[in-house]
Image: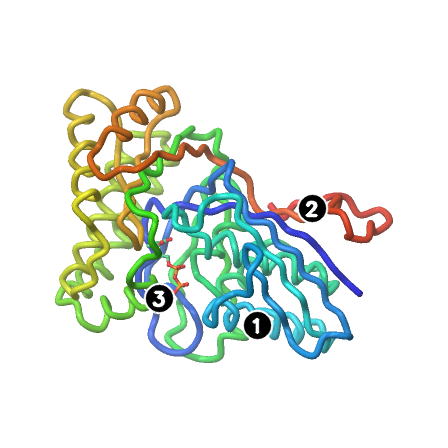
């Protein structure tokens, strides 16, 4: 029996990945830059066992639904192909944040699964190789292997075999480089209507603005990266908001509408804060929730304003966190002599 437990955190993209390169594999069409969040975790245990006749995936205590299970089984099959060990695995994964909170549970979920599966199967992979493995299940998961500010390039290959095309995220600055608080304004508790994989595909296939998005996104990305490196919070926030608005504008033109009235109310509140001199900026992912980016000293005031927005049910405050890591102290995991809690970042 070989097992490992990994912990990973969600990440929020400041410049959005939206759209895949055509051809085989799961390669982003545009670069993205994210920040990994502290205080919200996915914890995943993987156990390879010769007594199992198939992989088993349990998410928050219940068997995972068909699509999540299929993606997890694909990841496990990639690990088996790399290690040469044919055993099936039992996967138990749990989020300590509400799944409908608008935080990308697939990012932390596949990052934790990739790290735990690689470790449990004895693969001595560095964080970049694990990031590449996670990307093949969900592109945004590649970024959760690392802490602080993290960048993922666009894929360079328009087709070909994904197994031979490597693409991993990389850390570009620690959280302390430019401290930031993220206020997640939860506007509804239901699951989102259109998953991101389908939403971005429909956008690229049907939006009259798809080409505009694909050419504009890398320019926004380069400018935001420069603002981050220059520690210019105001410029970085403004560019993050632009990236989210451009992504949604292209999606909305294809009929992919994630916004609700509460989304617009929250966006309006953020504009009001800026008009009052507060550096607050908004970003929105593939759902209705608005995430507000502020400097830590403004978090309490902005949280109070956001909580009073019509349609906002609650506000979750997160700071910048660390990359995924193996929990070598987890109960039931055999301690390996000389191996410490190996950090992936
Ligand atoms: C809006 O990584 O969930 O959150 O690769 O198809 O699994 P797949 O998509 P996913 O998309 C994330 C989209 C986003 C922006 C981002 O995180 O960059």
Which circle's residue, 3 or 2, is located before the other in the chain? Answer: 3
- The answer to which quarter of the image holds residue 2 is bottom right
Q: Are marks 1 and 3 in contact (CB under 8 Å)?
A: no
Q: Is residue 172 left or right of residue 78?
A: left
Q: Which residue is mark 2?
A: 327
Given the current orientation, which residue lies at the most extreme front position?
62
Q: Give the percent coordinates (x, y) of residue 88.
A: 69, 74
Question: What quarter of the picture does the N terminus occupy?
Answer: bottom right
Question: What quarter of the picture does the C terminus occupy?
Answer: top right
Q: Are marks 2 and 1 in contact (CB under 8 Å)?
A: no
Distance of mark 1 from mark 3, alpha carbons? Answer: 18 Å
Q: Which residue is mark 3?
A: 197
In the structure shown, which secondary structural element does the residue marked by tag 3 occupy?
helix
User: Residue, x 63% and y 73% (percent of image)?
Assistant: 55
Q: Residues within 10 Å of mark 1 (few under 14, many from 20)?
A: many
Q: Is residue 50 left or right of residue 207?
A: right
Which circle's residue, 2 or 1, is located before the other in the chain? Answer: 1
In the structure shown, which secondary structural element does the residue marked by tag 2 occupy?
loop
Q: Is residue 173 above or below residue 204?
A: above
Label 3 lies in ligand 1 vicinity (Cβ under 8 Å): yes
Quarter of the render that holds ligand 1 = bottom left
User: Residue, x 20% and y 58% (percent of image)?
Assistant: 257
Q: Which residue is mark 1?
A: 73
Q: Closest to the observer: 344 or 335?
A: 335
User: Residue, x 30% and y 20% (percent of image)?
Assistant: 301
Q: Are marks 3 and 2 in contact (CB under 8 Å)?
A: no
């Amino acid at each position: 029996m070989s097992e490992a437990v990994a912990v990973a955190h969600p990440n929020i993209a400041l410049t959005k990945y939206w759209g895949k390169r055509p051809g085989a594999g799961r390669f982003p069409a545009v670069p993205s830059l994210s920040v990994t969040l502290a205080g919200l975790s996915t914890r995943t245990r993987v156990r390879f066992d010769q007594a199992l006749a198939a992989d088993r995936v349990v998410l928050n205590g219940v068997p995972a639904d068909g699509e999540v299970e299929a993606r997890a089984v694909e990841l496990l099959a990639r690990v088996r192909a790399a290690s040469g060990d044919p055993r099936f695995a039992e996967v138990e994964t749990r989020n300590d944040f509400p799944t409908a909170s608008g935080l990308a549970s697939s990012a932390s979920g596949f990052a934790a699964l990739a790290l735990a599966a690689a470790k449990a199967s004895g693969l001595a992979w560095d964080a970049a190789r694990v990031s590449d493995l996670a990307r093949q299940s969900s592109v945004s998961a590649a970024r959760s292997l690392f802490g602080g500010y993290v960048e993922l390039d666009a894929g360079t290959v328009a087709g070909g075999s994904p197994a031979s095309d490597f693409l991993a995220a990389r850390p570009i600055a620690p959280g302390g480089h430019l401290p930031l608080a993220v206020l997640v304004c939860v506007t509804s508790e239901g699951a989102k209507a259109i998953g991101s994989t389908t939403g971005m595909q429909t956008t690229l296939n049907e939006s009259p603005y798809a080409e505009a998005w694909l050419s504009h996104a890398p320019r926004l990305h380069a400018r935001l990266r420069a603002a981050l490196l220059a520690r210019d919070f105001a410029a970085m926030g403004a560019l993050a908001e632009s990236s989210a608005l451009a992504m949604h504008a292209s999606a909305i033109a294809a009929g992919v509408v994630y916004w609700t009235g509460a989304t617009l109310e929250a966006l309006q509140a953020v504009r009001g804060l800026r008009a009052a001199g507060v550096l607050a900026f908004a970003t929105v992912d593939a759902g209705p929730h608005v995430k507000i980016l502020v400097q830590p000293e403004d978090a309490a005031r902005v949280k109070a304003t956001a909580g009073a927005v019509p349609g906002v049910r609650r506000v979750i405050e997160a700071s910048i966190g660390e990359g995924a890591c193996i929990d070598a102290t987890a109960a039931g995991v055999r301690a390996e002599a000389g191996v410490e809690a190996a950090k992936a970042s």
